[in-house]
Image (tube, rainbow, N blue to C red):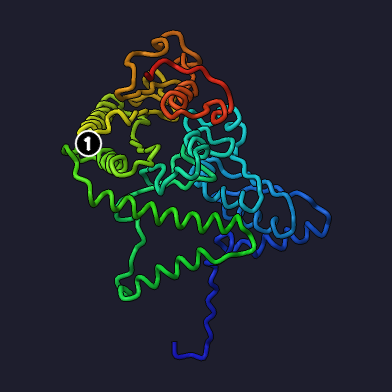
């Protein structure tokens, strides 16, 4: 700049909460401690302020309750894990919705993890490999949320690896060694060591396993040129090369058809059908047809009446499909009535948790009552 000015750069990358907010949280916790306060309650959006106050509370021995915006609570499980590693209690807000419907019909995340995440947690840690579950998408599915088991979330093969800077190719291995050392550096909080060090190593191991599987795999069929088919191909690779893989998760959006449902719904079902057909033919050709059960679900159904835009609005009931050689085909539950409604909603005749319980008990061999937090009757859909 050709001036005598001094420029000071404040680096916050090593802040325990990942932001500047401890600058405010620590003094607040300190002065409350001096006044004899034992518990602080706060709110947080994405979780940065909640993490900062949880960190401050851990320093001064305060109990911290954090009410986190529900969408962030669902989508950012590792932010919750960070707060909880500092000893805070993190609760979804609004809480009444969580209490009334434990998971919105989807993940059962209200009591510390998703139902599939809790399934993975009860497995013997010695038998869990680098990739016990594959979550293919840009964010972790709520049903896979876990405080203990690292879940590989793969947005794309190119992104699911340590990104190299072409400017520094000659020292790429040194940079990797430095990352290892950084995440293995002990601090005063063992839970933090486990959270950061374990998450880094799990992500690295998972990335290597996924990349190696992709490089070695040859699909037996041609997959459609759709996002869902591409995701299922990635999952097929994981099934073929990873004997420790217990759960795979993919998603297809667009079914929230408030308008133009007739055309859009048909196109979505065609994409779904073609992608699943290719996936099943592929895993069968590789000899895995007796090792896989496919299950579909959604967080909400549709109402039977059309709206003014040629679509339907959110409803309380919807279908669930199961596919596989071990599935006993048929319709389970009563056919939905289009006239006997509950406040314009279809009446469901099968509790979705009974479907979850059936998959847990009959297919995964897991304690459904412990995982779901209640006893739900199973359905004779799996041999």
Q: Which residue is mark 1?
A: 286
**Quadrant position of the C terminus in the picture:** top left
In the image: residue 328, left or right of residue 220 = right
Q: Please provide percent x and percent y for residue 366.
A: 49, 29
Residue plotted at (52% across, 76% down):
9
Q: Residues within 10 Å of mark 1 (few under 14, many from 20)?
A: some
Tell me where residue 364 sits by quadrant.
Answer: top left
Tell me: residue 260, above or below residue 304.
below
Residue 345 visible within the image: no
Q: Please provide percent x and percent y for residue 184.
A: 52, 64
In the image: residue 18, left or right of residue 135 = right
Q: Please provide percent x and percent y for residue 10.
A: 55, 73
In the image: residue 52, left or right of residue 148 = right
Q: Residue furthest front?
A: 126
Residue plotted at (70% across, 60% down):
59
The foreground one among 39 and 305 is 39
Q: Please provide percent x and percent y for residue 47.
A: 57, 51
What secondary structure is marked by label 1? loop
Numbered circles on residues, count: 1
**Quadrant position of the N terminus in the picture:** bottom left
Tell me: residue 352, above or below residue 89.
above
Tell me: residue 171, above or below residue 258.
below
Residue 317 visible within the image: yes
The foreground one among 281 and 305 is 281
Residue plotted at (38% across, 51% down):
206
The foreground one among 167 and 258 is 167
Residue plotted at (23% across, 52% down):
215
């Amino acid at each position: 700049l050709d001036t005598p000015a001094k420029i000071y750069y404040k680096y916050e990358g090593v802040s325990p909460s990942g932001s500047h907010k401890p600058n405010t949280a620590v003094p607040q916790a300190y002065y409350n401690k001096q006044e004899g306060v034992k518990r602080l309650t706060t709110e947080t959006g994405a979780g940065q302020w909640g993490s900062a106050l949880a960190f401050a509370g851990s320093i001064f021995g305060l109990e911290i309750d954090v009410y986190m915006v529900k969408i962030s609570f669902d989508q950012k499980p590792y932010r919750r894990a960070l707060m909880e590693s500092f000893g805070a209690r993190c609760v979804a807000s609004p809480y009444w919705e969580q209490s009334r419907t434990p998971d919105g019909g989807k993940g059962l995340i209200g009591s510390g993890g998703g139902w599939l995440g809790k399934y993975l947690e009860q497995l013997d840690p010695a038998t869990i490999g680098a990739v016990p579950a594959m979550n293919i998408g840009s964010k972790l599915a709520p049903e896979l949320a876990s405080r203990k088991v690292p879940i590989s979330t793969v947005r794309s093969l190119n992104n699911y690896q340590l990104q190299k800077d072409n400017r520094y190719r000659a020292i790429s291995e040194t940079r990797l060694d430095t990352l290892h050392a950084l995440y293995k550096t002990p601090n005063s909080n063992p839970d933090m060591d486990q959270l950061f060090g374990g998450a880094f190593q799990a992500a690295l191991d998972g990335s290597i396993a996924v990349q190696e599987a992709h490089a070695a795999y040859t699909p037996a069929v041609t997959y459609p040129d759709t996002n869902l088919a591409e995701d299922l191909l990635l999952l097929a690779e994981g099934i073929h090369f990873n004997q420790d893989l217990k759960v795979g998760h993919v998603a297809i959006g667009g079914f929230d058809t408030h308008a133009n449902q007739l055309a859009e719904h048909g196109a979505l079902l065609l994409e779904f059908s073609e992608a699943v057909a290719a996936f099943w033919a592929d895993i069968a050709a590789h000899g895995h047809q007796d090792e896989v059960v496919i299950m579909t679900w959604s967080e909400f159904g549709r109402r039977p009446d059309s709206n003014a835009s040629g679509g339907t609005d959110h409803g309380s009931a919807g279908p669930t499909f199961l596919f596989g050689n071990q599935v006993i085909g048929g319709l389970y539950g009563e056919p939905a009535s289009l006239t006997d409604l509950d406040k314009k909603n279809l009446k469901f005749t099968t509790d979705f948790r009974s479907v979850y319980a059936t998959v847990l008990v009959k297919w995964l061999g897991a304690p459904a009552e412990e995982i779901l937090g209640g006893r739900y009757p199973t359905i004779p859909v799996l041999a």
